[in-house]
Image (cartoon, rainbow, N blue to C red):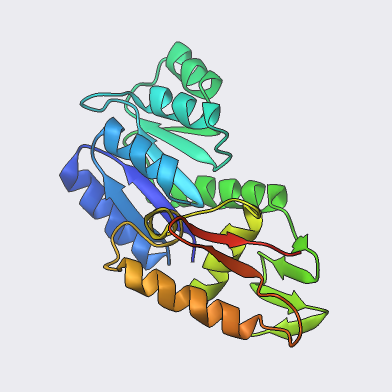
Amino acid sequence: MPKLLLVEDDLEFASSLQELLRLEQFVVEHVSTGKEADERLANYAYDLVILDWQLPDLSGPEISELARRRGLDTPILILTSRNAKEHRIAGLDQGADDYLSKPCDFDELMAHLRALLRRGARAKISKLSAGALAIEPQTHKVFLHDKEISLSKTEFLLLEFLLRHQGQVFDADALLNRVWSSESEVSRDLVKVYINKLRAKLKIEGEPPLIVTVHGVGYRLDPG
């Protein structure tokens, strides 16, 4: 299911839109300020972002510009009541991928979101690998020495993140912020549990573990 961040300060409209999007099988997280949106985009992964233009602090285009400067490539749609041509140009120039005026037809909005998802999927890497380890993000398949390994959804997301950042050390808090939903109730101890599960499933007799504990610092994927 696609994970979507909705940034909208009209709480009644946001509630209605969330309900409709969830019926379309989206996982929706909602924030109502630009600061909250910037923090979420800096620390969590999403498949799509819907930004309201006018927020209490930062504007939608300002948020998208900040995110693009950090290297975010997630598709962004700006949803706003501003219809002037110069506003559309400004929004797109500051990093948005699409623009839709409010009020909008929900079916039309869904068509735009599907198009953005297709565009994003084409841009995604089809395979990630390091040493004997390989994963396919689109199919959630994992291979070690060409043998397929079965992982849970959370195990896969954790491994994918570590593989995308191989060689870097992350403590439990960093992994909680990057892998788990901001709305989930998880602890540092749970991170350790999942690290141990991954180690057990990826263990090859006679070879060092792929996930290394850097004592007092955190965890690192080291393919050798």
Is residue 200 shown above or below 27?
below
On screen, residue 133 versus residue 16, left or right, reads right
Q: Residue 61: which quarter of the image?
A: top left
Of the pair 56 and 20, the residue shown nearer to us: 56
Count all numbered tags in the image, as a single digit.
Answer: 0
Q: Which residue is drawn at 65% across and 55% down?
A: 166
- For the C terminus, the quadrant is bottom right
Q: Which residue is drawn at 39% across and 21% down?
A: 83
Q: Which residue lies furthest to the top in this view?
A: 86
Q: How far across and down, in percent of the image, does residue 12 sit?
A: 16, 46
Q: How far across and down, in percent of the image, does residue 92 sit?
A: 53, 23
Is residue 67 shown above or below 137?
above
Q: Which residue is drawn at 29% across and 49% down?
A: 30
Residue 101 visible in image: no
Q: How far across and down, in percent of the image, does residue 200 sit?
A: 58, 85
On screen, residue 78 versus residue 12, left or right, reads right
Q: Residue furthest bottom?
A: 205
Q: Residue at x 70, y 47 (%)?
A: 123
Is residue 100 shown above or below 119?
above
Residue 89 visible in image: yes
Q: Residue furthest front?
A: 215
